[in-house]
Image (cartoon, rainbow, N blue to C red):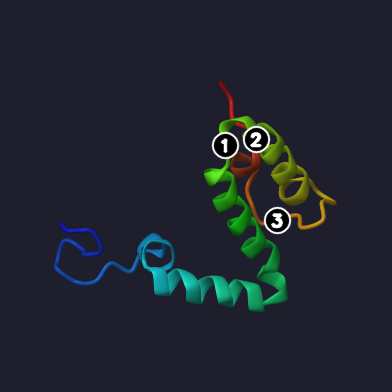
């Protein structure tokens, strides 16, 4: 099936399609997150992860450390406690 369409020809309703792959959907969802105090940390984390994906290899370790302390550590400035332990575990290997 072409991207964005389900097997039966209907529109894909997945989160990835609507809020990540579609520019207008991504913009609207980000604005929603940023406008709700309880989701502000999630919006900031998303922005920082996108920045991390664009940074040079030499900057990645320091950037990852800042992400972990800011978002993944209890008591961090923008702790995202809704994330699972698996999601916040440092990569192995």
Does 9 appear above or below 45? below
- The numbered mark, 1 or 3, whose residue comes first in the sequence reads 1
Camera-side mark, 1 or 3? 1
8 w.r.t. 52: above or below: below
Instruction: Locate the C terminus by quadrant.
Output: top right
3D distance between C-alphas at marks 2 and 1: 5 Å
Left or right: 52 in relation to 40: left
The residue located at (62%, 35%) in the rendering is: 60
Question: How far across and how far down the image is residue 75, in percent?
Answer: 85, 51
Residue 11 shown left or right of residue 26 in the figure: left
Q: Where does label 1 land, which residue? A: 56
Seen as rendered, the residue at the extreme right is 75
Task: Name the secondary structure under disc 3.
Answer: loop
Task: Give left or right: position of 59 versus 17.
Answer: right
Mark identifier at residue 59: 2
Q: Quadrant of the N terminus?
A: bottom left
Residue 17 x, y percent position in the rendering: 35, 63
Mark closer to the observer (2, 3): 2
Q: Which mark is residue 80?
A: 3
Q: Mark 1 and mark 3: span between their CA atoms?
A: 25 Å
| Spatial CA span between label 2 and label 3 | 23 Å
Which is nearer the eye, 52 or 35? 52
Q: Are the residues at dot 2 and dot 1 in contact (C-beta closer than 8 Å)?
A: yes
What x and y, as percent, mark residue 12? 28, 67
Circle nearer the N terminus (2, 3):
2
């Amino acid at each position: 099936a072409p991207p964005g369409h389900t097997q039966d020809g209907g529109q894909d309703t997945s989160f990835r399609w609507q809020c990540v792959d579609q520019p207008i959907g991504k913009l609207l969802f980000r604005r929603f997150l940023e406008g709700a105090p309880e989701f502000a940390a999630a919006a900031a984390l998303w922005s920082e992860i996108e920045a991390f994906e664009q940074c040079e290899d030499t900057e990645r370790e320091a950037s990852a450390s800042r992400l972990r302390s800011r978002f993944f550590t209890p008591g961090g400035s923008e702790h995202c406690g809704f994330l699972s332990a698996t999601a916040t575990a440092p990569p192995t290997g």
